[in-house]
Image (spheres, rainbow, N blue to C red):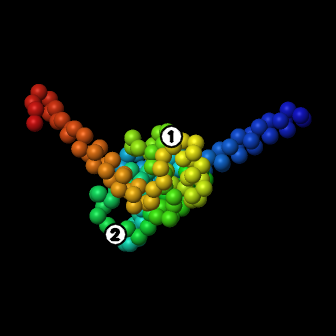
Amino acid sequence: MKKIWISLLLVLSLATVCLAAEKVETPDSCKHCGMDRTKFAHSRMVVTYTDGSSAGVCSINCVATELKKSKKEVKSFQVGDYNSKKLIDAKTATWVIGGSIKGVMTKTAKWAFAEKSDADAFIKSNGGKLASFDETLKAAEKDEAERSKNMKPKEHTGHGDHTM
């Protein structure tokens, strides 16, 4: 009987752990790079357009790509709080650019925090500097432009024995 209770507790514990790794809103993967948005819930973003459509991406760096491609009018930006992973208003969030924690889709990390005190604590532990949403988006757009500039065009090797 004791083994049954221990087994039951083990199963319940594992179920609790699985439920704790909550999935995020759709889509599951970033529209632009394919990264798992649940795994990167702390940096994911949702762009909502005035026409009612939306785009889910892994980071502000893929937001820069999204905005370059979509050309639609934006209604709102939401971002995952670095600590809680809950979606917050990206424009009112406190952003940190840089620091020792590796960023998502960028050489220069960009993190959002619901509370300024959390951003200050992050900077104290990991470095970086406070920034507004507009400053952070401009930095992401600059990173995206550099990525685009450094990408080599795909070479077409042709079909069979001929080249195109």
Q: Residue at x 83, y 35 (%)?
A: 6
Answer whether residue 26 is visible to the viewer in this image: no
Where is residue 52? Give x, y as percent: 41, 70
Quick check: 138 above or below 147? below
Coordinates of residue 64 in the picture (x, y in percent) = 35, 55
The residue type indicated by label 1 comes to Ile
- Between marks 2 and 1 in the image, the one whose residue lies nearer the viewer: 1
Q: Which structural element holds mark 2? A: loop
In this rendered view, identify the residue nearer to me: 85 or 154.
85
Determine which residue is flagged by label 1: 101
Task: From this view, report whether residue 88 is shown above or below residue 123.
Answer: below
Helix, strand or loop at label 1? It is loop
Task: Report x, y in % for residue 31.
Answer: 39, 52
User: Would you call the spot at circle 1 few (<14 residues within 10 Å), some (14-19), or many (20 or more)?
Assistant: some
**Position of the N terminus by quadrant:** top right
For the image, the number of numbered tags is 2
Mark yes or no: residue 164 visible. Answer: yes
Point out the residue furthest to the right here: 1
Characterize the local packing of mark 2: few (<14), some (14-19) or many (20 or more) Cα atoms within 10 angstroms. few
Q: What amino acid does circle 2 point to?
A: Glu
Q: Which residue is mark 2?
A: 73
The quadrant in which the C terminus is found is top left
Whole-percent x, y for residue 41 in the image:
53, 50
Q: CA distance from mark 2 to mark 1?
A: 32 Å
In the rendered view, does 45 fall on the left or right side of 70? right
Residue 161 picture quarter: top left
- Identify which residue is drawn at 36% across, 52% down: 139
Mark closest to the chain's N terminus, 2 or 1: 2
In the displayed structure, would residue 110 be above or below residue 92? above
Residue drawn at point x = 41 percent, y = 55 percent: 136
- The answer to whether the residue labelled 2 contacts the one labelled 1, judged by CB atoms less than 8 Å apart, is no
